[in-house]
Image: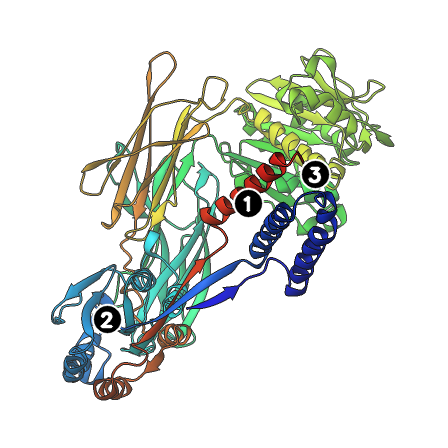
């Protein structure tokens, strides 16, 4: 045993504090008690000194350190990879990795038997978990390899028993998901701190794919919440090995859910390529190993939650085919909006295009060249077919550049219900000659050749009658008026005049009463005339003004297309992620809104999951703020999973909502079964072990059999603190109490 100190301050300060306290007691205290007999003087001074010494001990924080040699039984773990990737036949003569591992075990067994006379040897098969075995078998059927999680388990065991070493024989490929996806390096570092070094031997080749023909697609990047008839961009990675010069056909498949109820999976159908449906790409790899990103797109024609897939067609001599397709679930909402926007190149054009960030709105824009370059204008006549677009916006473009035929077609689209808007500019309204076109019958303004565009700074303010119009709600109701006052003014505007005899409404005006935004219902169409063309200045102002710009334009489009009151179901359920690897967690969130769209609290939710086999499993729901949440992990079987939630409304009526997610048929264990020697080397390094070849491992075991395992005897120390306990506190109280009683008895208190 030895005494150790951990002073609260540096040693000189602690010693100085002790000297000062003793000096005060020695110099100041005796003067107050000099009239007492010698016995009482010595007793009181002694008690004060004892208190000072006790306080000094607290400052020094002494501890007794007890050391001993621990010769307790040690354990040697032999951990062998039993996962599916060990069936890869990349050894000499076509031998599988598991067979190579068994050969190593057979050669090591005599040494392990000798070591086992002094040390307990435990054999373990490692896959998604660890299984105790007596003798390793040839089968390797583990569906995952959780290296990190299993090494962490051993590191925690090392806190309860002495693990002399861990022999880890594996291909080093971690393939696992969900809660077992633990960093192997961190687990090995923890093992090293517990004095349990890891000695690794890698089995298998890291060059499997370089000698094997294989095509695979991965990393499907697509918006998960889209609208019907909007273009949905798709990005996907194509990985090819040994396919140089060969034709690789990558295509998009979409589920046909016509007349199918929830819980049923539809047939996957190829989408026929067209101008909007770029659903087929043919790629010829130039190198033996190639990794490229391909861009595709399609236009969904049916609403609901549908499955889409991107697949690369299997080549005749391709062996592994589980990685040729990648799938996900997307939600296609009805009410998607497509807008055609024509304008010359100017700031308003640049910033107006940014409303495309909304997944609900797709704004297709065409840059129109002026008259001197009119031959460069390449109009897409499909844009003028009724039903292809929900609204049209024309900017600073003269009518002559369209031509009478296209404007007549645009007018016909509006007669059938498409919205129409014209915004300010030198060649807008009368200045652009639109009073001589069919569009004059739509616009709620009178136009002439002499119409002018003003160049003054003109603030834009809602009219009194339009303060609650949805177009003009750019902030909460109590802030909306002030926000309009704070916006930068328009830099100029067209001088608009309401047409006589119309039913137009002025929605916004200047402080002097000049109309700036005029709306009107014309037959089946909604029409807006906007005098301004510099709202882009809002988008470069403060953050709230940027949001106001986006909201103003999105709400214009919603109003033009009669979608300003569109909304989602009051009961909803989401799953993240939508596509999982086998064994991964599916996180569920759900909620119920009241009639005003406000989330309801205190709702009881019933949640269940229907798996690919048709069996239902109840999911425990928990409350998070005003929403509900749940977790589901029984995802080992590939296929479609349907999540259903039900909840009672305040009036007792029952609401239901359903969504879907899928577990891919991809096999993370076998899709790319390359060995990873770098990981095995790092595991050994951070745990203070060694990265060995099979021969080196046998030599190391021979040494241990002859000389014993290193560091079996461990010095253990136990630290017993002497200051922070009840005895110390009790002694302090007793000393103070006795000293006070003595002073009380002698009349000093």
Res. 103 image quadrant = bottom left
Q: Front-most of 704 and 358?
A: 704
- Decide: is 265 above or below 114: above
SS at badge 3: helix
The disc placed on residue 735 is 1
Q: Residue at x 22, y 76 (%)?
A: 97
- Decide: is 197 above or below 330: below
The span from disc 2 to disc 3 (Cα, nearest Å) is 63 Å
For this orientation, the residue located farthest to the right is 456
Q: Is residue 212 visible from the viewing direction of this image?
A: yes
Identify residue for label 2: 75
Res. 266 image quadrant = top left
* Left or right of 336 on screen, residue 542: right
Q: Is residue 170 visible from the viewing direction of this image?
A: no
SS at badge 2: strand
Q: Position of residue 485 (x, y in %)?
A: 78, 25
Dot 2 crowding, Cα within 10 Å, few <14, some 14–19, many 20+: many
CB contact under 8 Å: marks 1 and 2: no
């Amino acid at each position: 045993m030895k005494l150790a100190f951990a002073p609260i301050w540096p040693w000189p300060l602690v010693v100085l504090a002790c000297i000062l306290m003793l000096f005060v007691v020695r110099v100041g205290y005796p003067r107050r008690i000099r009239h007492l007999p010698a016995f009482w003087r010595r007793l009181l001074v002694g008690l004060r000194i004892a208190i000072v010494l006790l306080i000094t001990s607290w400052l020094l924080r002494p501890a007794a350190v007890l050391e001993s040699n621990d010769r307790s039984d040690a354990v040697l773990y032999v951990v062998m990879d039993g996962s599916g990737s060990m069936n890869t036949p990349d050894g000499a003569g076509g031998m599988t990795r598991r067979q190579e591992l068994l050969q190593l075990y057979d050669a090591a067994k005599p040494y392990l038997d000798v070591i086992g006379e002094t040390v307990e040897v435990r054999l373990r098969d490692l896959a998604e978990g660890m299984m105790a075995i007596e003798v390793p078998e040839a089968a390797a059927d583990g569906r995952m390899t959780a290296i990190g999680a299993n090494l962490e388990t051993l590191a925690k065991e090392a806190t309860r028993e002495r693990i002399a070493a861990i022999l880890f024989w594996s291909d080093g490929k971690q393939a696992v998901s969900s809660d077992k996806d633990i960093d192997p390096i961190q687990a090995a570092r923890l093992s090293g701190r517990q004095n349990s070094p890891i000695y690794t031997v890698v089995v298998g080749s890291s060059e499997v794919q370089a000698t094997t023909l294989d095509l695979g697609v991965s990393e499907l990047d697509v918006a998960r919440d889209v609208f019907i008839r909007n273009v949905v961009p798709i990005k996907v990675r194509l990985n090819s090995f040994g396919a140089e010069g060969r034709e690789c056909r990558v295509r998009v498949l979409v589920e046909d859910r016509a007349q199918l109820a929830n819980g049923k999976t539809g047939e996957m159908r190829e989408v026929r390529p067209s101008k909007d449906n770029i659903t087929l790409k043919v790629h010829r790899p130039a190198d033996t190993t190639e990794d490229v990103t391909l861009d595709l797109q399609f236009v969904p024609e049916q609403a609901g939650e549908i499955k889409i897939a991107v697949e690369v067609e299997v080549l005749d001599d391709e062996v592994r085919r589980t990685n040729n397709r990648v799938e996900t679930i997307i939600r296609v909402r009805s009410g998607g909006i497509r807008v055609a926007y024509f304008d010359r190149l100017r700031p308003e054009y640049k910033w107006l295009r940014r409303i495309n960030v909304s997944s609900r709105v797709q704004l297709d824009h065409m840059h129109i060249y002026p008259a001197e370059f009119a031959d460069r204008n390449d109009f897409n006549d499909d844009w003028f077919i009724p039903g292809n677009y929900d609204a049209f916006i024309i900017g600073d473009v003269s009518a002559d550049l369209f031509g009478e035929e296209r404007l007549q077609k645009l007018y016909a689209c509006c007669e059938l219900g498409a919205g129409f808007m014209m915004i300010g500019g030198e060649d807008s309204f009368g200045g652009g000659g639109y009073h001589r076109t069919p569009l004059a019958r739509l616009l709620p303004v009178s136009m002439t050749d002499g119409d002018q565009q003003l160049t003054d700074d003109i603030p834009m303010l809602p009219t009194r009658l339009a303060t609650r119009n949805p177009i003009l709600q750019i902030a909460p109701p109590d802030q909306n008026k002030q926000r309009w006052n704070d916006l930068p003014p328009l830099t100029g505007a067209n001088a608009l005049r309401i047409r006589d005899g119309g039913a137009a409404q002025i929605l916004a005006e200047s402080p002097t009463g000049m109309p700036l935004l005029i709306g009107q219902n014309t037959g089946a169409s909604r029409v807006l005339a906007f005098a301004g063309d510099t709202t882009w200045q809002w988008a470069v102002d403060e953050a709230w003004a940027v949001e106001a710009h986006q909201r103003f334009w999105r709400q214009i489009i919603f109003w033009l297309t009669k979608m300003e009151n569109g909304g989602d179901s009051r009961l909803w359920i989401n799953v993240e992620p939508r596509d999982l690897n086998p064994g991964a967690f599916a996180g569920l969130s759900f909620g119920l809104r009241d009639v005003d769209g406000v989330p309801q609290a205190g709702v009881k939710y019933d949640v269940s999951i229907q798996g690919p086999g048709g069996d239902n499993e109840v999911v425990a729901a928990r409350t998070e703020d005003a929403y509900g949440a749940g977790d589901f992990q029984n995802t080992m079987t590939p296929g479609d999973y349907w999540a259903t939630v039900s909840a009672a409304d305040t009036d007792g009526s029952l609401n239901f909502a359903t969504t879907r997610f899928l577990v891919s048929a991809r096999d993370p264990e076998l899709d790319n079964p390359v060995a990873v020697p770098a990981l095995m080397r790092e595991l050994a390094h951070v745990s203070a072990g060694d990265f060995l070849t099979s021969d080196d491992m046998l030599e190391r075991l021979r040494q241990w059999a002859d000389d014993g395992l290193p560091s079996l005897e461990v010095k253990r120390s136990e630290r017993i603190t002497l200051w922070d306990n009840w005895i110390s506190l009790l002694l302090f109280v007793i000393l103070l109490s006795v000293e006070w009683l003595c002073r009380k008895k002698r009349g000093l208190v």
